Image (cartoon, grey):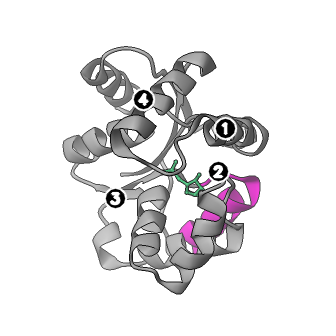
């Protein structure tokens, strides 16, 4: 099964994606994780991406499209994957459509996790303190939320039009939310 999960920063996409991939025995592809690994490795992509990530900005579309295209074309993806954090803009969604079509992959579901914004900002500030993520400071968090509503939320309509959007309430206990997701994609 090939699917994606989206939602505002702090809604728990990564946590849920990790659990869903185990249950469905598919890969979890987080573009945030891939980019952080590139930054850590000090690769050319990483050095470039860091300039955007540290300020809560989106890394340019062409970089993301290239990274994802290369990744999902690998044979280990044939069986299924869950994209987390991609696409985040309309050009990325259109790019994904094209690249999946060209390798005969079909996107079955787009899961949208929803939650109240104040709750999310509080969660992220806590995560920033606990994990020391350089983009989890209050200013950067608010900026990332704003970008989500401006650039990523329009994708809800994109997937609604394709009749593959499933909205899931992202507030509650972690296992309970996982069950909600599994239920809607059954
Ligand atoms: P995340 O872990 O998904 O919150 O991503 C952390 C940061 O990586 C984001 O704030 C962006 O700077 C960058 N990033 C991850 N995925 C994308 C994407 N699809 N498009 C642009 N930037 C991205």
Mark 1 falls on what kind of element? helix
Instruction: Name which of mark 2 and mark 3 comes first in the sequence.
Output: 2
Instruction: Name which of mark 1 and mark 2 comes first in the sequence.
Output: 2
Instruction: Name which of mark 4 and mark 2 comes first in the sequence.
Output: 2
Work out whether 96 lies above or below 124.
Answer: below
Q: CA distance from mark 1 to mark 3?
A: 36 Å
Q: CA distance from mark 4 to mark 3?
A: 33 Å
Q: Position of residue 68 (x, y in %)?
A: 51, 70
Q: CA distance from mark 4 to mark 2?
A: 17 Å
Q: Are the residues at dot 1 and dot 2 in contact (C-beta closer than 8 Å)? A: yes
- Disc number lying in front (2 or 3): 2
Q: CA distance from mark 4 to mark 1?
A: 14 Å
- Circle on res. 139: 1
- Circle on res. 56: 2
Q: Residue at x 73, y 43 (%)?
A: 147
Q: CA distance from mark 1 to mark 2?
A: 9 Å
User: Does residue 169 appear left or right of residue 59 in this picture?
Assistant: left
Residue at which label 4 appears: 126
Q: Is mark 1 within 8 Å of ligand 1?
A: no
User: Does residue 176 appear left or right of residue 41 in this picture?
Assistant: left
- Start-end of magenta stretch: 87-102
Q: What secondary structure predominates along the stretch shown in magenta?
A: helix
Residue at which label 3 appears: 80
Q: CA distance from mark 2 to mark 3?
A: 30 Å
- Disc number lying in front (1 or 3): 1
Instruction: Name which of mark 4 and mark 1 comes first in the sequence.
Output: 4
Q: Position of residue 48 (x, y in %)?
A: 62, 76
């Amino acid at each position: 099964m090939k699917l994606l999960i989206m939602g505002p920063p702090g809604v728990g996409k990564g946590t849920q994606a990790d659990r869903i991939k185990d249950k469905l025995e598919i890969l979890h592809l987080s573009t945030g994780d891939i980019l952080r690994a590139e930054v850590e490795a000090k690769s050319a992509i990483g050095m470039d991406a860091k300039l955007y990530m540290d300020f809560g900005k989106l890394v340019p579309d062409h970089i993301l499209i290239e990274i994802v295209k290369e990744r999902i074309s690998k044979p280990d993806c044939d069986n299924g994957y869950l994209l987390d954090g991609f696409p985040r803009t309309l050009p990325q969604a259109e790019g994904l459509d094209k690249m999946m079509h060209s390798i005969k992959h079909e996107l079955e579901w787009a899961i949208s996790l929803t939650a109240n914004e104040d709750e999310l900002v509080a969660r992220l500030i806590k995560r920033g303190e606990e994990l020391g993520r350089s983009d989890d400071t209050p200013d950067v968090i608010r900026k990332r939320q704003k970008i989500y509503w401006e650039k990523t939320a329009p994708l809800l309509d994109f997937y609604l039009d394709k009749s593959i959007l499933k909205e899931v309430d992202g507030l509650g206990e972690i296992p309970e939310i996982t069950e909600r997701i599994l239920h809607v994609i059954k």
